[in-house]
Structure formats: structure tokens, C-alpha cells
Image: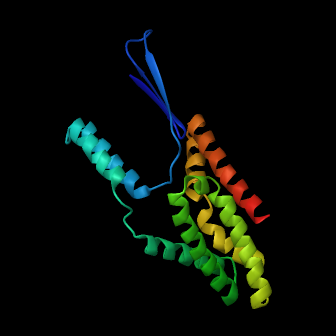
Amino acid sequence: YQFFSTPTSIMASFGPVGRHRTHMLRIVPGEVDLAKLADLEHVSIDVAQGRMSPEDGIAEIERVVAAPPPYGHALTTLAYGLASGAACQFLGGGAREIAVATLLGLAVGVLALVAERHVRLGRVFEPLAAFLVSLATIAFAHLAGPLLVIVATIGGLVVLLPGLTLTTAIAELATRNLASGTARLSGAFMTFLGITVGVA
């Protein structure tokens, strides 16, 4: 048996050499969940080293995949706002910019919760969020007085930047996993492009 995996497909070949039967599964990349990835790695190691049977491993995988998020929706949304405010402070924003970026980060968090429940909205989440954040920042600048629009906008959108995806893609390209690295890099580029178009 042989396996080949990329972020968008999995190919598996079974049988003796020269008479392989190959199957390909098309998959849709999901959100990065580091806690679940760590749990799945522990399960795979336990099965590979014989500490867990394959049947128990399958049951454990199903449990890990079906597990609810470790943090509730309210705390996750609050984290969006805090991350946006902190990023705005890091970018040199003043009190107004930090307050606006924090509110916009909270709004992006609420929109992310809605996008989880609606597949069509999820497909355009980044450009739509970027457009709404940019529009809201300009509105705040007109209503609340002087405001560094670009700093507040970037602060409000920092949670959407695909930093981990980009880092993983570069690491895969550096280790010559070209198919997987190119797919991830293309995905990160498209996210950046969607955000840029939304802001523009």
C-alpha cells in the first residue's frame, strides 16, 4: 500500500506492484485546529506503537473529530477583539484606533460564528469581512473624528491573516514537499488576495 496526501486530495494505492488499485479522495481543506491535530497525532502514535488497537484508534479519532471546541463562542469572539486591539497597539495606533480595532475584531468574530453555520457565507468570509471592516472604519473616522484608518483596518483584520498556513507552506517547500507546499501557499495567497480586494 502507498499513500499520497495534499491539502486538497488523498490518493491510496493497494495491491502488489504492477497491479495497484488506486483511489483518490477529493477533500476540502478545513480550519486549522491545533488541539485536534495534537490529539490525532497521539492516537496515531499509540496505534503505531501497539498501545492501542486499530479499532480503538478509529473510535478515538471519531471522538476527537466530533469533540466540541474547547472554548465557547463567547470567549472565542472576545479573543478576536483582544487580538485586534493588541495588534493595533503593536502597529502604533492610539486609543481611538485601538478601541475601533477591538470593536471591529469583535464584529469579525461574530461574523465568523455566522459563517460557520452557512456554507455559502463561509466561502466569501474573508473578502466580505474585509469589506465590512474597511467600510466600518471609514464610518468611524467620519463620525468619531480623526482616525488612522489603515492602522485600525489592519488591526481589525489581523485575525484573518493566514500566518500558520503560510509558515507551514514555506516549511513544506523548504523540505521539498512541493505539492503540499504549493497548495498551501496558493491557499494563503488567495486569502491575502480576498482580504486585499475586500479592503479595496
Drawn side of residue 195 relative to residue 38, left or right? right
Task: State whether residue 94 appears in this view.
Answer: no
Which quadrant is home to the N terminus? Answer: top left
State the residue at coordinates (36%, 65%).
70
Marker count (numbered):
0
User: Is 170 situated above or below 149?
Assistant: above
Drawn side of residue 173 relative to residue 133, left or right? left
Q: Nearer the viewer, residue 128 or 42?
A: 128
x%, y% of residue 60? Answer: 27, 47
Q: Nearer the viewer, residue 117 or 69?
A: 117
x%, y% of residue 176? Answer: 58, 36
* Rendering quarter of residue 158: bottom right
Drawn side of residue 64 relative to residue 158, left or right? left
User: Is 49 situated above or below 97?
Assistant: above
User: Is 4 situated above or below 124?
Assistant: above
User: Is 55 situated above or below 171?
Assistant: above
State the residue at coordinates (37%, 15%).
15
x%, y% of residue 94? Answer: 69, 87
Which quadrant is home to the C terminus? Answer: bottom right
State the residue at coordinates (38%, 54%).
36
Which colour scheme appears in the figure?
rainbow
State the residue at coordinates (66%, 45%).
186
x%, y% of residue 42? Answer: 31, 48
| Residue farthest toward the top in the current orientation of the protein | 18
* Rendering quarter of residue 99: bottom right
Task: State whether residue 134 appears in this view.
Answer: yes
